[in-house]
Amino acid sequence: MPSEHSSSAPPDLARIAPQVDAFMAEWLAEAAVGPELKDTIGYALLSGGKRLRPVLAWLACEAVGAPGQASLPAGAAVEMVHAFSLVHDDLPAMDDDDLRRGQPTLHVRSGEAMAILVGDALLSMAFEVLCVDTAATEVTPLLCRELARGTRLMIDGQVLDTLGSMALTDAEPIEVVTTIHARKTGALIRASARMGAICGLHQTGRSTDGPELAAVTAYAEHIGVMFQAVDDLLDVESTPLETGKRTGKDSNAGKRTYPECLGVEGTRDLVASLREQAEAALEPFGERGQTLRQVAQWLSQRKA
């Protein structure tokens, strides 16, 4: 199985990811669910992963001047939604994958029925985390709204990617790909960063709807699309051993991808442009945005 944290990854991943894992493990240990469901949720939620989304929440919280720990419930909630989406995406009716992070996908391990139920449980747990563990009740509705919006757009993007849409039939192929991935992948990344910034802004007594949130949003939107463009490159250039999942499946399924529309070199150019735009969006934060810049650089060059 490939390492989830390569040597080129920002050191903050090694600093933050274990704290996220510990928070989620403690939450799951105390959850009022039966042992079989708890074990299977743990397999889906705690079996590795880059923890990109909660890391972004943490770093966005720090970028606006608050301790990153204030974002832990928000980051955990987004990671639970992300885990739910992976479990359901891997199902035979969807992407029909049998490998995830170098291990059998959940429906292969535990059956389709359990995989569906685990996804349902993770989605509900995400909002429970926000409602129970967000210290300031007045900010909870803002976080729930961000997570709900990101989840809805993620599902809409998955519908477009899997089933297509009459609304996109007249669009140029590159427009179709960008629309799908801005929702399917980008929306939850956007929600992660915004939720972290909202936590930090609220804790420091500043506006949760001002220029700092707008800057974080622009950054997250650029890296969200960039993340999927790199994923598309990995799908055509890497092996299952390197990525921990099947490769070549998008082209085999006839899905539109950035390399299909732009070619491999054109997709690399797009990744470089999106990284530059993401880094430029962080200018208002000065040094406080440095780690987010490093994350953008790492994501543009990742190998898994």
Image (cartoon, rainbow, N blue to C red):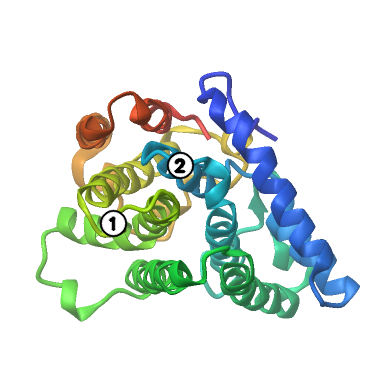
- Classed neighbour count for the residue bearing mark 2: other residues with Cα under 10 Å, few (<14), some (14–19), many (≥20): many
Q: Is 93 above or below relative to 284? A: below
- Report whether residue 199 is seen: yes
Residue 301 marker = none
Q: Quadrant of the N terminus?
A: top right
SS under mark 1:
loop
Q: Is 61 above or below relative to 275? A: below
Looking at the image, which residue sits at the far top? 7
Name the residue located 49 percent from the left edge and 33 percent from the top edge: 238
Residue 207 marker = 1
- Report whether residue 47 is seen: no
Name the residue located 22 percent from the left edge and 51 percent from the top edge: 214
Q: Is 52 above or below relative to 190? A: above
Name the residue located 82 percent from the left edge and 67 percent from the top edge: 30
> In this rendering, would 139 be left or right of 177?
right
Q: Which residue is mark 2?
A: 66
SS under mark 2:
loop
The amino acid on which the numbered mark 1 sits, given as a three-letter code, is: Ser
Residue 187, image quadrant? bottom left
Label 1 or label 2, whichever comes before in sequence order: 2
Q: Gap between marks 1 and 2, in whole Å?
A: 13 Å
Query: What is the x, y in percent for residue 42?
Result: 77, 59
